Amino acid sequence: MFSLIAAFLIALSVHAGPAAAQTSAPAPTQVPTQAPTQASVAAPANGGVITLNDGYVMGVGDVVEIAVLGREEFKPRVQIQVDGTVQLPYLHSVMASNLTVIQLRERVAKLLRDGGYYVDPVVSVTVVSYASRYVTVLGEFAVPGLVPVDRAYRVSEILARAGGPRPTASDELVLRRATGEEVILPIELLSRGGPADDPLVQPGDKLYIGAAPNFYIYGQVNAPGAYRTERGMTLRMALARGGGLTERGSTGRLSLFRNGKQIKVGLDSVLQGGDTVVVGERFF
């Protein structure tokens, strides 16, 4: 009888062992959630089409400072690399090119929050140096060169930033778009015309002002020489610019040469660049 009870207990312990082992095993360790990839960040609401009207659009070469409020350990000043990314603490490579300041701020805040680095980070983004978006100004500007565009600028504003036109400048400005389109703009209308007379520029545009054409005046005038041809300048105005007639000069003895040919004109005829005016002597 005793042997039967012992055998029963031994069999019971053999069958219960595996079940006890399963219930006592520790739960598997959870793998921490990884930081979201760049693809998980929301795209611009307007379908990715960003203009300077939305704010400055950052690009390769720009230097930005990205900071988390109250966190001195996260305040890098970095340059956007040729692949369009910036290198940030914790996050490593973050795409920044073709984003506005607000969009990059929201992207960094989302990555830090979703990655568990900060609970509710307050992120600020400041463009320290503008290098990727500019227009080129050439010719008779006071200060020709590259003008950064950190927002939507009109032609008159770029003209002002480049120091205005030189005294020898033409009265027309040529705006050449990055697409190849050319627009001729009278400089006078930039200040007193409407929006159509003073269009917005875009990064990659070129602005050119040529030298003003001259007219030449000789003979019986007090100050013969070469002078700038103003828009709408008449022969009467040209005589005044030349200092007026001498005592021997006569308005009846005027000759005007254009493209190598003498043409008949009156005092109210409009001059063209390259014209030559000769004032002859009176007979008595």
Image (cartoon, grey):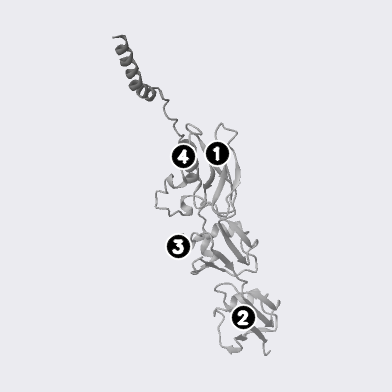
Residue where numbered disc 1 is placed: 90
Q: CA distance from mark 4 to mark 3?
A: 41 Å
Say which of 112 and 189 sits in front: 112
Mark 4 vs 3: CB contact within 8 A? no
Quarter assignment of residue 231: bottom right
> Which tag is nearer the camera, tag 2 or tag 1?
1
Describe residue 252's horizontal placement relative to residue 151 as left or right: right
Q: CA distance from mark 3 to mark 2?
A: 31 Å
Q: Say what amino acid the circle numbered 3 marks.
A: Ala
Residue 4: give its label: none
Q: Earlier in the sequence, mark 2 or mark 1?
A: 1
The crowding category of the residue bearing disc 3, from other C-alpha atoms within 10 Å (few below 14, some 14 to 19, many at least 20), is few
Q: Quadrant of the N terminus?
A: top left
Describe residue 122's horizontal placement relative to residue 7 as left or right: right
Q: Is residue 122 above or below residue 270?
A: above
Q: Is residue 153 above or below residue 20?
A: below
Residue 274: give its label: 2
> Which tag is nearer the camera, tag 1 or tag 4?
1
Q: Earlier in the sequence, mark 4 or mark 2?
A: 4
Q: CA distance from mark 1 to mark 4?
A: 13 Å
Residue where numbered disc 4 is placed: 110
Residue where numbered disc 3 is placed: 196
Q: Secondary structure at mark 2?
A: loop
Q: Earlier in the sequence, mark 1 or mark 4?
A: 1
> Which tag is nearer the camera, tag 4 or tag 3?
4
Residue at x 34%, y 20% (from the top left corner): 16
